[in-house]
Amino acid sequence: MTWCSSPEEKGAFFMKISTRQIAIASALAALSTVVQLIHIGYQSPTWGMWIDIVSVTWVVAYFIFGLRISILVSLLGAGMISLFAPETWLGASMKLVATLPIIIMISGWTIIRKKRIDWYVKPLHLLVPLLIGIIVRCLVVLPLNYYYAIPIWTGMTPSMAMKAIPWFVIAAFNSIQSIIDVIFAWIIVYVFKINRFSNDST
């Protein structure tokens, strides 16, 4: 299993990515784009917010290859979503900014605990970093929603947006989304044994 958050990887973060890794990363990014175009998920009829599986493959990339490949997949996925569905560039940017704290916190927790990624084969080990990641995610997306996304998307002022969509609604949707991303990714990687595609060169 890959050392993706070890001290050794810190210095090797920007080392050459193999052709195999690029191919799998591209496939995962493309899959997230397809899911976005089809937009599998649930949209709140009241708030218009989505809970979907677009960023599940971004987290899958972390469990397989580690942080740097996961960031690559996230960037590629967000870019491809914007390219093939131009009207979703705003959503793509928000999805990227919202998902990265989860991935980074999960990765950072293995550094703190000095563990390998396969430590997460036990799902309870994800509880603390996921909780911290959700808190950080909410701290990031709340101001971004009120001062960036909602004003651009609806034309509302920040004060109007705060009255129209309470902060706890945004926090709840992002919390549920984070849990879905991590749980689905964990199932795909560890239940269906997709981690066999990992290697020791990441």
Image (cartoon, rainbow, N blue to C red):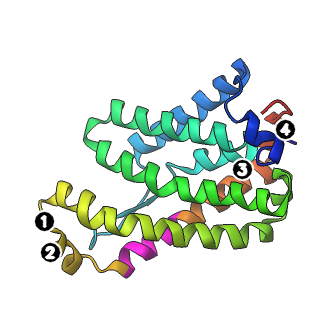
Please name which of the two marks, 3 or 2, marks the residue nearer to the observer.
2
Dividing the picture into quadrants, the one containing residue 23 is top right
Which numbered circle lies on residue 164? none
Q: Nearer the viewer, mark 3 or mark 1?
A: 1
Mark 1 surroundings: few (<14), some (14-19) or many (≥20) residues within 10 A? some
Residue count near mark 3 (Cα–Cα under 10 Å), binned few <14, some 14–19, many ≥20:
some
Residue 122's place in the image compared with 92, above or below, is below
Residue 14 visible? The answer is: yes
Q: How many marks?
A: 4
Q: Nearer the viewer, mark 4 or mark 2?
A: 2
Whether residue 48 is visible here, answered yes or no, is no
Question: Which circle marks residue 156 in the picture?
Answer: 1
Q: Main secondary structure of the magenta part?
A: helix
Question: In which quadrant of the rendered view does residue 120 lie?
Answer: bottom right
User: What number is the disc on residue 196?
Assistant: 4
Seen from the viewer's position, the closer of residues 138 and 176 is 138
Q: How much space separates mark 1 and mark 2, taking CA atoms?
A: 6 Å
- Distance in Å between CA atoms under marks 3 and 1: 39 Å
Residue drawn at x 80%, y 42% as measured from the top left: 195
Say which residue label 3 marks.
188
At a point 78% along the width and 40% down the height, the residue shown is: 9
Amino acid bearing label 3: Ile
Looking at numbered disc 4 in the image, what kind of residue is underneath it? Answer: Arg
Classify mark 2: helix, strand or loop: helix
- Residue 64, percent across and down? 75, 42
